[in-house]
Image (cartoon, coloured by chain):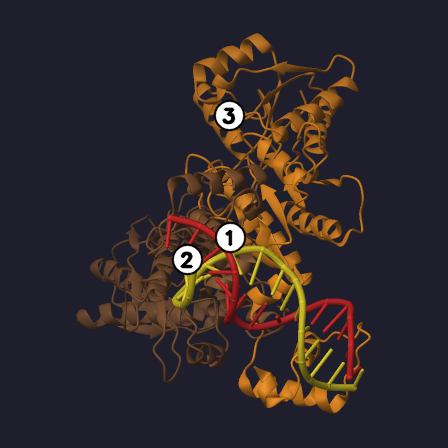
Chain colours: A orange, B brown, C red, D yellow
Amino acid sequence: MARLAGVSSATVSIVLSGRTDTTIRISPETRARVVQAAESLGFMPNPAAQMLAQGRSRLIALFYFGDTFPYEREHQFYLSLLGIEREASRQDYNVLLITRGQSAEKRSIYAAGGNMLRLADGAILMGPLESPDELARLVEDGYPFIYIGRRQVPGYEIDWVVSDYIQAGYEGARHVLGLGHRRLGFVWNDSRTEEVRDRQRGIERAAAEVAGAELVAMPQGILTDAGQMERALRESGISALLCAGQASVRASLTRLDELGVRVPADLSVVALSFDEGRQWPWPALRPTHVRHPESLVGERAVQALIARLDGTVEGPQHWRIPCEFVIGNSTAPR
Amino acid sequence: MARLAGVSSATVSIVLSGRTDTTIRISPETRARVVQAAESLGFMPNPAAQMLAQGRSRLIALFYFGDTFPYEREHQFYLSLLGIEREASRQDYNVLLITRGQSAEKRSIYAAGGNMLRLADGAILMGPLESPDELARLVEDGYPFIYIGRRQVPGYEIDWVVSDYIQAGYEGARHVLGLGHRRLGFVWNDSRTEEVRDRQRGIERAAAEVAGAELVAMPQGILTDAGQMERALRESGISALLCAGQASVRASLTRLDELGVRVPADLSVVALSFDEGRQWPWPALRPTHVRHPESLVGERAVQALIARLDGTVEGPQHWRIPCEFVIGNSTAPR
DNA sequence: CTGAAAGCGCTTACAG
DNA sequence: CTGAAAGCGCTTACAG
């Protein structure tokens, strides 16, 4: 310890932590002596001991539900992570990635090593949630967390931050409605997550505002089978197709290519999520799409968590981060 | 504590940690009683206390040198991170992202909160290293770490894991040499990192094996200025251009487009690093390129670190992970 | 086979 | 203005 080189013990703690709020004042000489001793010895407080004594770690845990990252989500995850990392850095927090004891089959917070969450002051949770049970337990334990993605836990109000998928659906639908389309289709590739539901909700809202507008249900099979796509187009009579994300817009365009359906001449297509950085197989087609602010979502999640930790907020925090609508050439007047 | 529900105290620790290696044996009844008590109370050991007592955390710290991620490196970083995360999960480690106290100007391990490294059992370091001083200190302190990227610290031998950039340069050069090219150019966009040097070394090695082959120095200006590119091509007389990475191959092709130089008819171009997932502005051109195994590098780094922690290895560990050479249509016989 | 004690290295009231 | 004590919640030898 530096106490050998200096003279005190608790003094070291106070000096090195730089606390001035305390009633205790320390002479500049002592302070200097301690600092110098610590420096010459290369002394650094043991963080585990600090955490134990203080009961705080300045750590934010990050937990991803779901086994591995499908590529489409991968990028979203990465951008969110970047935002989380950046904001954590600003706020002087470190980020703890919870990866331990996670088998491919079940991703569980309370699996082996799950108590690692407790090392952190709070957590940011992401990814497809199978069952809300673990969240319920977390809430009951009084553990602070934010979900990236709108999640519901029956009987509780949890905090969440999400890209505004309702807005995405709404603006996508408004756009094609403005172009004169009335019968709109909607497809998604993922399972029917809250994020998909929200897009649909947005579409329905826009449709409700325009006379004669209608959201027509499309079978999932159209993404994988050109025959089904053909039949669905014929039977539904849609003239615009709204795709939930990267995967569904690609699958749709591939099927449409196979059928010789021209975009946008025969059918307008909108991507309600789109990663502009990714390889795009149709060079001439710049899809009309929605750009989601994933890294802002990450930043906001950190801010929300810290607000919760500091107790500067009460009641549930629900943030929808606005997205940006980009008009390309995959949509045309009816 | 579960000691209220159970009967013991240290027994709880032994039972819950599942240790059987100790000389101490505990009756199955006691064991069951403890487990049940812990379960009913929802008891989970405090990880900070465990770390302090055990002196181990099963945490791997991850530190990225360099202020923010340029997009080109971004993807590499992400893939490495994915590999690290996956292998850490397998090995039952969590990952600690060191982000705290990092200003844009200086990224320093020993900056505020730098002792957080000590929370982890060891670290994986990545990114452009300004000065090796901090690494030297780390070595002297006996702190175990692996660098992703070949780094030299004068006077010390440090562990590193890296994609085989020498092989990349070598295979790229062999390929165009095999096509009859003799005068080869090499450009890079980044600062002259070890990764760039290694590519060049590989090219030189290949050139040394073929009579008349020569690596011709190219000015950096060719990436930003078509005039300089034109002059350099004329004066150097190269017929093949090896580009270090994504950014330099894009910049080169853009300049060549401006000059009306046809690829590969007038000039063969090889990308010694390439991200196939990214948007590519030349649909007809599938570049001959090298695919780097970033996520394998991440996995290997974790393995190397754990080997170091377990003491199952002695002497420096230096791993070059093989990359894959992909022939496209940006190269043609001379 | 089990319990009581010491110790991990800090921080935080609390006396001097 | 500074020092000695207790405590954070575990684990690990060490007695019983």
Q: Farthest residue in the top direction? A: A235
Q: CA distance from mark 1 to mark 2?
A: 79 Å
In front of the other: A189 or A16: A16
Of the two numbered discs 2 and 3 in the rendering, the one whose residue sits closer to the viewer: 3
User: What number is the disc on residue B121?
Assistant: none
Amino acid type shown at disc 1: Ser
Q: Chain of mark 3?
A: A
Of the two numbered discs 1 and 2 in the rendering, the one whose residue sits closer to the viewer: 1
Secondary element type, mark 1: loop
Q: Is residue B86 visible?
A: yes
User: What number is the disc on residue B9?
Assistant: 1
Residue topped by disc 3: A252
Where does the N terminus of chain A fall, quadrant-wise? bottom right
- Of the image marks 1 and 2, the number of the one nearer the N terminus: 1
Q: Chain of mark 1?
A: B
**Quarter residue B314 falls in:** bottom left
Q: Horizontal and vertical percent for residue B15?
A: 43, 47
